[in-house]
Amino acid sequence: MDSRSEALSRASSRSSARRAEWGIALVGPTMRTVVLVQILLAAASGAGVADHAGAYWALTLCVVAVSLLLIVQCLVLGTVRRGAWHVPDLVLAWVAVPAMNLLLPDPFVVGTWEAWASGFAINVTALAAAWLPPVLAVGHGVALGGWYLAWTLTANTTSWETSLSNALTIPGYALVVAILVRYLRGLARDADQSREDAVAATRALELERYQLTVHDASSILRLLSDEDTPAEVLPGLRRQADREAQRLRTYLGAEPPPVDSSVPTVGAMLTAAMEGFEDLPLEPAVALGAHVELRQDVWTAVGRAVTTVLHNVRLHAQAHQVVVHADTDGTTWEVVVSDDGVGFDQASQPLGFGLDTQVGQALRDVGVAVDVRSAPGRGTSVTITGPVTEGRA
């Protein structure tokens, strides 16, 4: 695996979903801290006007305790989805609404922080939308808003507009937070999935690149290790093995790729591609197209493709004649490798990795067309065609 794949693998371990949860877990305690400070700043004043100061302080301290638990657990666990504060938080929001009406004088019930129930209820429903299912969170906000409105309207106050506004704000915040949290989590999941897809695609490309690199080398090693390989074939195989070893070292980064100083013509390419195949009954007929110059990437890809085709002929064709022909009409060039071997049925037998990927896909990637024709008992013909680059005919 190269550095790109390794980098993607490291990135995949840093889950976007996990980071999104941490972000939500940090926002939750921050919101609660702001509300808690406001409650504590007004607590002494509220206790001073409350009919039962002890009950007022007890309720306030319960909110403080649950809020501290919320803050600690969110920061330790890194999520608002788990925590012992969930149920107590909801219960306190529902209890605080009637408690403020019962403990405080009517003028303090609506629009003051001494009656902190509305601010606390808004915060509770907003945080609940981050850990409850969205529909349930909004439904809870509507119910708590109705509960708040019903109690405050019983107080002797003329601020019914404020009561209604506060009541609507409770489910409003629940809805906004539910939408935002759902969107953030969905976005994070999509990012994680995209990263996993990228890692998988990179690994697949690396595997294909590896297969392309070792395909011909494995054919050579197979013949070199076979005791039945004729002695006259071995010198050519050893030269090919040395060439493949150099290419593998280049692939692994052990040494820089060799620089070919020769002119990248079709003739030079075919000469290099046919090296080491003296054991095959080769009949080169390349004079008509040998002078055509190719781009370096095309020269390399076509040479590798012809070598792969000849390896296939050596391993499978049992041919008595192998013709390598090159030609050009001035606008296109053509290389044909044909044999009179056993062939195969294209309708029932798909192309193997060598012909399909190492030849077909690799050449299409550099803008070169490939046509494979074969039939049982009638041999195989591989035709490679490409455009003549201006000034290189």
Image (cartoon, rainbow, N blue to C red):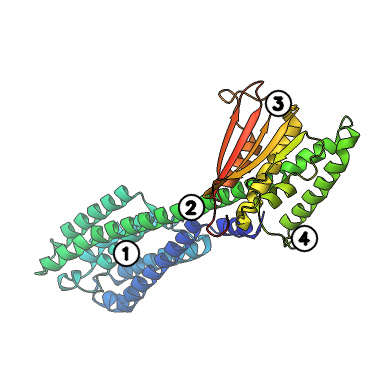
For the residues labelled 3 and 1, the Cα–Cα distance comes to 81 Å
x and y, in percent, of residue 318 in the image: 75, 26
Q: Which kind of residue does numbered mark 3 sit on?
A: Gly
Q: Which kind of residue does numbered mark 4 sit on?
A: Ala
Of the numbered discs in the image, which one, if any, rests on residue 341? 3
Q: Is residue 356 visible?
A: no
Front-most of 96 and 21? 21
Which mark is nearer the camera, 1 or 4?
Answer: 4
Is disc 3 placed on a helix, strand or loop?
Answer: loop
Front-most of 98 and 50? 98
Tag 3–tag 2 contact (CB < 8 Å): no
Image-based side of 337 in relation to 230, left or right: left
Q: Which kind of residue does numbered mark 2 sit on?
A: Ser
Q: Which kind of residue does numbered mark 1 sit on?
A: Asn
Residue assigned mark 4: 254
At 83% from the left and 47% from the top, the residue drawn is: 239
Compare marks 2 and 4 and give the one earlier in the sequence.
Answer: 2
Which mark is nearer the camera, 2 or 1?
Answer: 2
For the residues labelled 2 and 1, the Cα–Cα distance comes to 34 Å
Of the numbered discs in the image, which one, if any, rests on residue 102? none
Residue assigned mark 2: 194
Residue assigned mark 1: 123
Compare marks 3 and 1 and give the one earlier in the sequence.
Answer: 1
